[in-house]
Structures are given as structure tokens and as C-alpha cells.
Image: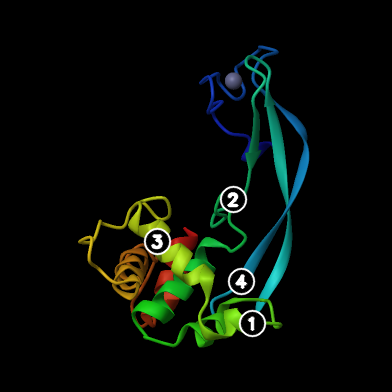
Amino acid sequence: MGEVRPGRCPACGAAGRPAGARLGLHGHGWRERHQWGPAERDDAAAVFGLLLRRYRCQRCGSVVVVGPRGLLRRRLYSAGAVALALALYGLAALPPAEVRRRVSPLRIVGVTAAAGWASLRRWSRAVCAGRLFPVVRQLPADATLRQVAARAATTLAAYAPSSGGLAVESAAFLGASM
Ligand SMILES: [Zn+2]
């Protein structure tokens, strides 16, 4: 698993594996995380358990957790799942309940959640504020959440390795997972 060791400590900048030195980033166990959403863009949504490698910086003591691409910090859903949801909401203009059915692994929906989907509004607001997918250009302050979602989806779709012939929501899923 040495290949995933970060090149530098993100806190102090110490080299991850300096030649011939005892300093650097040393393996420090594992952390389990769950990731929600479809594994591939056409799959049913599910909950996945991931084991993330932890490293400890021998210089400053920081613990660095290394995860796969497409993992969003402090969010349950994968980047691809969020992008897919934003595309279905913003571009395909599906009702939030239908977006939820496609992207959420939860099958039991509360009464309040049945009408909308709080996660969708939260993600759109986070994009608007630059806290999620900061590559998305800012929209005017009066933009609707659907417009924000649409721009996020088209922006992320442009990052897909090959978008030729792909539906835009599939391209957004792939682009966000890069
Ligand atoms: Zn450090």
C-alpha cells in the first residue's frame, strides 16, 4: 500500500518518504468510512464500506487519511453520486423525490422528506457558497437552486474522461469521480 502514501505532509510540508531518513509519513492504521450512492452510474444506490489508510507525520504529529478519488470530505455521498443528483435535478428537471429514489440508498423516507430532498438543497447551497465543487463558477445571487445544480452538473460533466455519446448525467458522475 506504499503507493498511496502522500508525497508530503499537508500540515507541515515534510516529505512523505525522505531518502534514508526516519522522518516522514508512517503508516498509522486504518479508518473505516461509508460512502453512499451508486457504485457505477447505472447501478442501484448502496452503502459501501471503505477502509482508508492513515499516516502519521513523524515531524509534526499530524494524521493524514488517504482515500480513493471521488470521496468527499465530511459527506456521506460520493462525489459521483452528488453530481448525478445535481444533474438529474438541474438538467433533467426531475422532481426531488425521483432524484432521491435514483441516488439515495435509503428506502424509508420520512413524511417531510417525501416532498423534497434536503440533501439536494444542501448540496446546491454548498456549491453556491463554494464549499462543494469549487471549480463551478459562481452564479448571480438570485439564481435558483435548480440553476446552481445545472451549472454544477455541466461543469463536472466537462471533466469526464470521454463525454462523447454519454448522457450528461453520466458524464457528471464520471467527471466528479476524477
Ligand atoms: Zn507534518
- Res 66 quadrant in image: top right
Q: Are marks 4 and 3 in contact (CB under 8 Å)?
A: no
Could you tell which of marks 4 and 3 lies nearer the N-terminus?
4
Q: Quick check: is the Cβ at mark 2 less than 8 Å away from ligand 1? A: no
- Disc 4 to disc 3, how far (Cα)? 20 Å
Q: Secondary structure at mark 1?
A: loop
Residue that numbered label 2 is attached to: 74
Task: For marks 2 and 4, give the one nearer the viewer.
Answer: 2
Residue 125 marker: 3
Indicate the amino acid at tag 4: Gly
Which quarter is ligand 1 in? Answer: top right
- Residue extending farthest to the right is 29
Can residue 56 be seen here? The reply is yes
Cα distance between the residues tagged 2 and 4: 15 Å
**x and y, in percent, of residue 106 in the image:** 68, 77
Amino acid carrying mark 3 in the image:
Arg
Q: What residue is pinned by disc 4? A: 37
Judging by the rendered image, the residue that carries numbered circle 1 is 44
Residue 85 to residue 139: above or below: below
